Structures are given as structure tokens and as C-alpha cells.
Amino acid sequence: MTTEVLNLARTGVLRSRIRIVVTITIIWNIVEAIVALAAGGAASSAALIGFGLDSIVEVLSAAAVAWQFAAPDPEQREKIALRVIAVSFFGLASYVSVDAILSLFGLREPEHAPVGIVMAALSLVVMPFLSWFERRTGRELGSASALADSKQTLICSYLSAALLVGLVLNSLLGWAWADSVAALVIAGFAIREGIEAWRGDACCAAPVAALTGEQDADRCDDDCCQVT
């Protein structure tokens, strides 16, 4: 086989992997959203309802990548997919900020809920792996949208951690503000990532890479960072 044929075959494999990981992400988050919204409504838990809404945002981001890679030439849909992902980042940051501010001013108290703890713990197991797999594949493929979506997934993992830590600290120490402070920090990163996705810079070194210690590994070729 020629090098060109091998490269085309590898590209096909990578695109297939992207389709698989976003499908799993969509299914996981749909189930997560249904359970969280139902449990949150039954328990009048704003924290769980917010967790469900966050899952819907992640579905939107993953669906944009799935739509892109369903095309014969995914690169032609890259810019639109990045725009959708950017909007989902902004939506996520907006919700998290409002929810955190309401909590800090005492208008919403994080509630201790076994369902929330279990869901947050499961999310911390599943979502980082999905993010890593999509990020690794997207980096090799040179896909800015796949990398942006992987960061969206990773931020959702951080929100799960904030929810879990907040519930535990509130339950043990009465620190109702703990998850709100963490959530506001994450919201700031989400806004930055949204701006970079909108500009098409999602594959360059970014704040989330700094959080994961992968700042050097996430650097791509200049071509990856240019979306026309």
C-alpha cells in the first residue's frame, strides 16, 4: 500500500472512533439527564435539576460533532460544529454562574441526595475517559471540533466533582458555599473555551489543558487551529 492509501485508511478509522465516542456520550448524557431531572423534580432539588440541564448541554455539543462526522467530508462542517459547541459552552457557563450566585446569596441550598452522589460519582468515572479518548483521537485527526467537545465533556466532569464535593462538604461541615465557588471557577474556564471554539482555536493550548497537566501534549500543528 502507498502512504496515501494508509493515511486515508487511518483517517477512516479515526473518524469512526469519533462517531462511536460521541454516540456513547450522547446516550450516557440522555440517560443522566432523564434520571437527574426526574429525581430532582421529585425531591425539589435544584442541584440535581441543574445536573440534568448540564447533561442536555453536553448532548448538544456531542450531537454537533456527530452531525459533522456523519458527512462524507467532515471538514466542511467543522466551522458550524464549532459554533454550536461554543454556544453550548456559553450556555453551560451561564447556568452554572446563575446557579452558583443564587446559592452564595442563600437563595438555593445544595441538598444532600443519594441519587446525586451516585450520579456524580459515576460521571467522574465515565466522563474523563470519554474526554481523554475523544481528545486523543481528535488530536491525531486534527479536528478542532472533536477537541472542543472533549473539553466540554471534561468540564462536565469537573462540574460533577464540584457537585459531589459540595454535597459532601455541606453534609459533613455545613459548607453550603463550597460547590458554588468551584462552579464559578469552572464557569470561567467554560467561557474561555467557548471563545476559543468560536474562533476555531480549540486545538491550541488552553486553560483546560492547564488543569489536566496536558498543556504541551495538547499543542497541535498550526493547520489544526485555522478554521475557514
Image (tube, grey):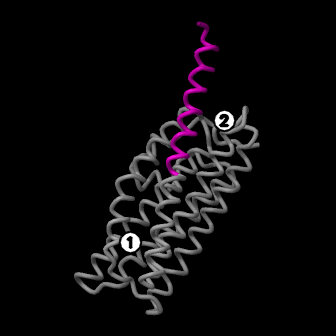
| Image quarter of residue 74 | top right
Given residues 16 and 81, the one toward you in this image is 16
Q: Main secondary structure of the magenta part?
A: helix
Of circles 1 and 2, the one toward us is 1
Question: Camera-side residue: 57 or 189?
Answer: 57
Q: Which residues are magenta?
A: 1-25
Using a 10 Å C-alpha cutoff, classify the residue at mark 2 as few (fewer than 14 neighbours), some (14 to 19) or many (20 or more): few
The residue at which mark 1 appears reads as: 163
Q: Is residue 11 above or below residue 33?
A: above
In the picture as drawn, the residue positioned furthest to the left comes out as 172
Q: Amino acid at mark 2?
A: Asp
Q: What residue appears at the point 45 percent right and 72 percent down from the top-left corner?
A: 183
Tell me if residue 4 comes above or below residue 174 in the rendering.
Answer: above
Residue 74 circle label? none
Give coordinates of residue 186: x percent, y percent.
47, 67
Q: Residues within 10 Å of mark 1 (few under 14, many from 20)?
A: many
Magenta-drawn stretch contains 134: no
Disc 1 to disc 2: CB gap under 8 Å: no
> Which residue: 62% across, 44% down?
144
Task: Quadrant for the C terminus, please.
Answer: top right
Determine if the magenta segment contains residue 7.
yes
In the image, 72 versus 93, the foreground residue is: 72
User: Which residue is disc 2 drawn over?
Assistant: 223
The tag earlier along the polypeptide, 1 or 2, is 1
Q: How many marks?
A: 2
Secondary element under disc 1, as helix, strand or loop, is: helix
Amino acid type of the residue tagged 1 in the rendering: Leu
Q: Is residue 116 above or below residue 227?
A: below
**Residue 223 left/right relative to 58:** right
Image vertical order of residue 149 relative to residue 221, above or below: below
